Image (cartoon, rainbow, N blue to C red):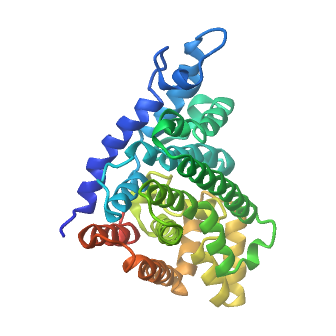
Amino acid sequence: MNLDIEKFLEETAPKIDKIIEKYIPRKFSKESVLFKVNQPLYSYNLEPLNKAIAEPIWDMLDRGGKRWRPAMFMLICEALGKERDYCLDFSIIPEVIHNGTLIIDDIEDSSELRRGKPCTYKIFQLDIAVNAGNGMYYLPLLPIMVNRQRLHLEIQRNVYEIYVQEMINLSMGQAMDIAWHRGIANADSVSEQDYLQMCAYKTGTLARMSAKLAAVLSGADNQLTEKLGRLAECIGVAFQMQDDVLDLTGQEFAKKKGGVGQDISEGKRSLMVIYTLQKANLSDKKRLIEILNMHTNDQNLRNEAIAIMQKYGAIEQVKITAEKMVIESWKEVDKLLPTPEAKEKLKAFAEFLIKRKK
């Protein structure tokens, strides 16, 4: 087994974008899939849909991103004995939702940059960005509506149930994150378990959605579906941890977000912050909380906060925690997956995501 993960992701991304475009076109027309399942009663007024939905959505999607959730969907289908492209249209569901959450997240965080460009709300204004972001939570359900004749009723029910449950989780996780980085709701006494629950809700949820959709559509039983969901959740949480590490240490990664330590400016209670607050002396603890509550863009203050976290080994500890989570969850699915070679590809994929440098 020799799967070049980086190359696989590079090759997969345009394939996924093509499927997204099939359902959410860059420019709506009367022939668009949307109107085949939801025909207008009075008129096709396409210009506002193109200006206020298609344009902002594709402005975000064209900024890139690894498209790792649909890639993982493909590898899970393969590990379950299906063709890698089996039910590929459904893989866009969590990916489009993810990009919608980025649009909304930037508004909630008052961010300036996303992937090296001004945030969507900065370009299209707040009202259009909110509506487009929310639209991305529902438009990717079009593949289910279009292909419902292919799907057994029980599978349809399971797919919708997975979607609804994970969307609820997503809102719960975002609520926790917002409350903490605003410095309210016991923000300075957040435990490791609290943080992991927030991540399981927020970052883990779309990875879990992707895995469980792939499993259900590939005919996996409930036990294997849940275990694959748990593995994907751990991958998603570990991916977030690595994001947090790169925000503090990765110059190239951080440049696209507005500089090293953007999470400090947002006051985020990352796992590195939690570990530091558990170990730090009173003076360092007080100073770190003070800087986080400033929501400052001063790079010197950001660097000071990073130095405090480095002093207590928090960054290295997070890397260890992330790797341990994925290893332990892998043990749960290892013996249950039927195809050895495809299984090894999935394992290599998980390891790549948590050790990446950008």
Front residue of 88/219: it is: 219
Q: Residue at x 51, y 86 (%)?
A: 313
Question: Residue 7's spot in the image, x, y percent?
Answer: 23, 55
Q: Is residue 34 above or below residue 105?
A: above
Front residue of 265/109: it is: 109
Q: Is residue 274 above or below residue 298?
A: below
Question: As drawn, which residue projects farthest toward the left?
Answer: 2
Image check: 291 left or right of 258? right
The quarter holding residue 344 reads: bottom left
Q: Residue at x 44, y 51 (%)?
A: 256
Q: Split into 4 quadrants, where in the image is the N terminus?
A: bottom left
The number of callouts visible is 0
Q: Is residue 43 above or below residue 28?
A: above
Front residue of 190/196: it is: 196
Q: Split into 4 quadrants, where in the image is the C terminus?
A: bottom left
Q: Residue at x 67, y 69 (%)?
A: 291
Front residue of 306/104: it is: 104
Question: As drawn, which residue projects farthest toward the right?
Answer: 185
Question: As drawn, which residue projects farthest toward the top?
Answer: 43
Question: Residue 107's spot in the image, x, y percent?
Answer: 65, 44
Question: Residue 183's spot in the image, x, y percent?
Answer: 77, 65
The quarter holding residue 270 reads: bottom right
The quarter holding residue 72 reads: bottom left
Question: Residue 83's spot in the image, x, y percent?
Answer: 29, 53
Image check: 191 left or right of 207? right
Q: Residue at x 45, y 27 (%)?
A: 25
